[in-house]
Amino acid sequence: MTGRRYDVEDPDSYARPVRRTRPRTKQRPSYEDATIGVVVTIDRGRYTCLVDARTVIAMQARALGRKAVVVGDRVKLVGDVTGGDGTLARIVGVEERTTNLRRTADDDDPIERIIVANADQLVVVTALADPPPRPRLVDRCIVAAFDAGLEPLLCLTKGDLAAPDELLEIYRPLNVESVVTQRDGDLTALKEKLVDRVSVFVGHSGVGKSTLVNALVPDANRATAQVSEVTGRGRHTSTQAFMLRLPFGGWVIDTPGIRSFGLAHVDPDSLLRAFPDLDAICEDCPRGCTHTRTEPECALDEAVAEGRVDAARVDSFRRLLDSREARSGDSHD
């Protein structure tokens, strides 16, 4: 039989040849003329990409390796990029990322998983009631935001069911911005925080992420569900991350509900860099200081005693450090 095993533009055709065969070519394709698209969702090996105003379905070239492409990636596309029915393009490259939002399955899991790429804001969505807020999980999401270089935004939903004051006070020392919403309420304040930004919505199931997305993008049609009366927790409705263009400018990425957020990849110094005032103080710490509550000579304690820094801010920072060590089961609380 004759015929090619690979298309001429498939990087696999340029892989290292097996022994006792002659290489096809020494030159690898540069794909300088490839079309650039943005990955908006992934489902069963098919990548939905936006190219200008059209939707293109693509598959990933095997040479890229597994899990090389995530939602939010800017990718190089070759093949049929018209977006017509039944067409299929190929992703042959990934543009350099500006940010990576990462998590691990558990705190002792060495394998990092990139959730989304190229976002600049992490919107931590939590309900004030039904289901009740879980501050330790919120802490972990904020840690992940700081580690990834994203600005965290605390979005408190169901403000018609409970007052936000107590929860807001917990995060006041961290200077994390916040917005409170309620069902069928005015979303102007939230829109002002989202306009012209790429924002990732995270939170445990049932807090109202998809409800917010449907209100922000009327034709989104994201699935929603009620909180279980038996467990008091939300049911998973979103199963894949999905990136949507906001009609007033910017993008929002709706993610599946989470029940744990492993932080095995985060070290204290990367978290400390998100707090320039504390970072400067910690320059006087002894070598190897972890800046936790049990460190006997941490410069943060001296700064608090001398009144050079707010004790509540140091305590809140250390709470975030503590959240890295919590077991995955604790992160549900």
Image (cartoon, rainbow, N blue to C red):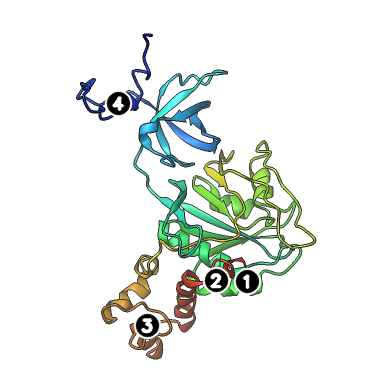
Residue beneath label 4, please?
A: 32
Which circle's residue, 4 or 3, is located before the other in the chain? 4
Among the two numbered marks 2 and 4 on one chain, the one whose residue lies closer to the N terminus: 4
Q: Name the residue under label 1.
A: 167
- Please provide percent x and percent y for residue 182: 72, 57
Residue that numbered label 3 is attached to: 300
Q: Distance between the residues labelled 4 and 1?
A: 51 Å
Q: Residue at x 59, y 74 (%)?
A: 169
For label 1, count other residues whose C-alpha is less than 10 Å away and answer few (under 14), some (14-19) or many (20+). some
Which residue is painted at 36% across and 88% down in the image? 296
Answer with mark 1 or mark 3, whichever residue precedes in sequence. 1
Q: What's under tag 1, amino acid-wise?
A: Leu
Q: Where is residue 243 in the image (x, y as percent from the top left)?
A: 55, 41
For the residue carrying disc 3, how many other residues have a C-alpha within 10 Å: few (<14), some (14-19), or many (20+)?
many
What amino acid is labelled 2 in the image?
Tyr
Contact check, label 1 and label 2, Cβ < 8 Å: yes
Work out how far the residue at label 1 is from the one at label 3, CA to CA, in angstroms.
Answer: 25 Å
Q: Badge 2 is on which residue?
A: 171
